[in-house]
Structures are given as C-alpha cells and as structure tokens.
Image (cartoon, rainbow, N blue to C red):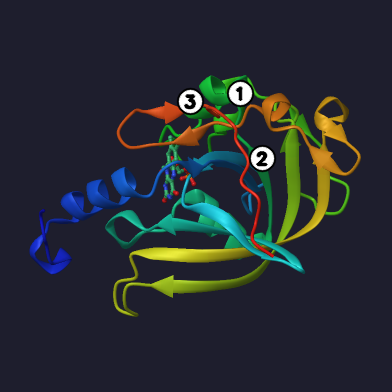
Amino acid sequence: MLSIDPAQNTERENYKFLIGSIIPRPIAFVTTVSKDGILNGAPFSYFNIVSSNPPMISLAIQRPGGRLKDTSRNIFDTKEFVVHIVDEKNVEKINQTAASLPHNQSEIELAGLTPIDSDKISVPGVKEAKIRMECVLEHSISLGGLDSPGSDLIIGKVIQFHIDDDIYENGRIDPRGLGAISRLAGHYYAKIGEVFSIERPK
Ligand SMILES: Cc1cc2nc3c(=O)[nH]c(=O)nc-3n(C[C@H](O)[C@H](O)[C@H](O)COP(=O)(O)O)c2cc1C
C-alpha cells in the first residue's frame, strides 16, 4: 500500500491521485457572458449538488498561474451562469469548448453549439443539453491562501430548471434517457453502467 504525504508530491502527482480516485465525476457544461457580451462555455467536473433545499450546486475552478479562467471571471462580474448536464450526444462538442481561446472568442461558436435564451437570467444556455439549470452566484470561496489562491469554489443557486420532455416522467428523470457522461482521469470518460437497487434500512 502506498502511503504518501501530498506535501511531498508535485502538483501533477496530487492532481492524478485526486482525479483517478474520485470517480466517476459528473460534468457540468457552464455558459457565462463576459462584460463585453461574449458567450463563453467550458466543462467542469469538480461539480456537484451542495444543497437540495434551497437547490444549490458547486463548481471548483482552478486558477492556473494564479489567473482566473474566463468562466470564473464572468461569474464574478455578472453573478449569473447556466449549468448543463453533459451526455452521450453532446460530449464531443462540449469537449471542444475546453480549448483555451483568447478572452474575446466564443467556444460556443467554435463547437457549433446553439445558444438559447434563459427565462430568468441574461446568460443564454445551449440547446444541445437535455437538462440545463439557470443559476445565480450564491457564494464563492477562494482556496489556497490569500496571496496565491489556486482555486475558487463557486456555489450557485438554481432558479430555473429546463428538462427535456422525453426524459421526464412523474417528477422523475430517466437516467437511461439522460445518458449522462462522467469524467475519469486522463482522456477517459464513462457512461452509466449497470443500474441496481439496494433498499435503505428503516
Ligand atoms: C471534462 C472536463 C472537465 C474539466 N473540469 C474542470 C474543473 O472542474 N475545474 C477546472 O478548473 N477546469 C476543468 N477543466 C478545464 C476547463 O474546462 C478549461 O480550462 C477551459 O478552457 C476553461 O474555459 P474558460 O477559460 O472559458 O473558463 C475540465 C476540462 C474538461 C475537458
């Protein structure tokens, strides 16, 4: 059994231990708008639910070289974003949006995704997702020390859900219909595998 103090590891070694261990990770495709009005989109797998009442989700966005990625900068500027669930049909296009483009270029156009207006916020989502959630920034926490934060934990409150009729029945979402994709390490992804049930003890 390996037993390692992360302080003795390089940043890359710790990254590989985390992304190889904490699997499968759901993937959010996040759209934001810059102060100049450019629609931005990028995938994030440090993503989860943090509260169901009220409905809230979290994203953790790294600061490479101490600099904000466009998504975090835009969320801090406008306080709004749209989270989409990445699925088997849209994963290829969404992967293209992870390209590091200059601040004034839209990954949405590059990937051929189709913007769609939101109901309650000014940031559009994209049509190519069976589920999308309009979010407002609830809270953010800068991690890694005040001098050189390495990451921002962003908590968003969901103020509108959009769910494809085909995967919705009686208040529930069909997991096979959704076909969500998860992120593993390296270039690997996974589909939903065998589904089984276990009763919860009373
Ligand atoms: C599937 C996938 C998951 C990713 N997850 C994260 C993540 O959770 N946090 C992060 O900082 N970057 C993550 N990235 C990298 C960002 O998507 C990438 O840096 C992107 O260019 C940021 O775009 P932006 O500058 O427009 O915000 C991920 C990339 C991929 C392909």
Q: CA distance from mark 2 to mark 3?
A: 15 Å
Asked if the residue under mark 1 is in contact with the one under mark 2, i.e. CB atoms within 8 Å, the reply is: yes
Asked if the residue under mark 3 is in contact with the one under mark 2, i.e. CB atoms within 8 Å, the reply is: no
Which class describes the residues within 10 Å of circle 2: few (<14), some (14-19), or many (20+)? Answer: many
Visible residue check, residue 124: no
Q: Which residue is situated farthest in the right direction here?
A: 170
Judge by depth and name the residue closer to the eye, 77 or 21.
21
Which is more N-terminal, label 1 or label 2?
Answer: 2
Label 1: which residue?
A: 90
Ligand 1 falls in quadrant: top left
Residue behind label 2 places its C-beta within 8 angstroms of ligand 1: no
Q: CA distance from mark 2 to mark 1?
A: 10 Å
Pinpoint residue 41: horizontal percent, then vertical percent.
58, 39
What kind of residue is marked 3? Gln
In percent of the image, x 45 and y 41: which residue is there?
A: 24
In percent of the image, x 69 and y 65: which residue is there?
A: 202
In percent of the image, x 11 and y 59: which residue is there?
A: 9
Q: CA distance from mark 1 to mark 3?
A: 10 Å
Which is more N-terminal, label 3 or label 2?
Answer: 2
Kind of element beneath mark 3: helix
Kind of element beneath mark 1: loop
Q: In the image, is 105 to the left or to the right of 33?
A: left
* Marker disc for residue 179: none
What kind of residue is marked 2? His
Which class describes the residues within 10 Å of circle 3: few (<14), some (14-19), or many (20+)? Answer: some
Label 2: which residue?
A: 84
Kind of element beneath mark 2: strand
Vertical position of residue 135 compared to residue 125: above or below? below
Residue behind label 1 places its C-beta within 8 angstroms of ligand 1: no
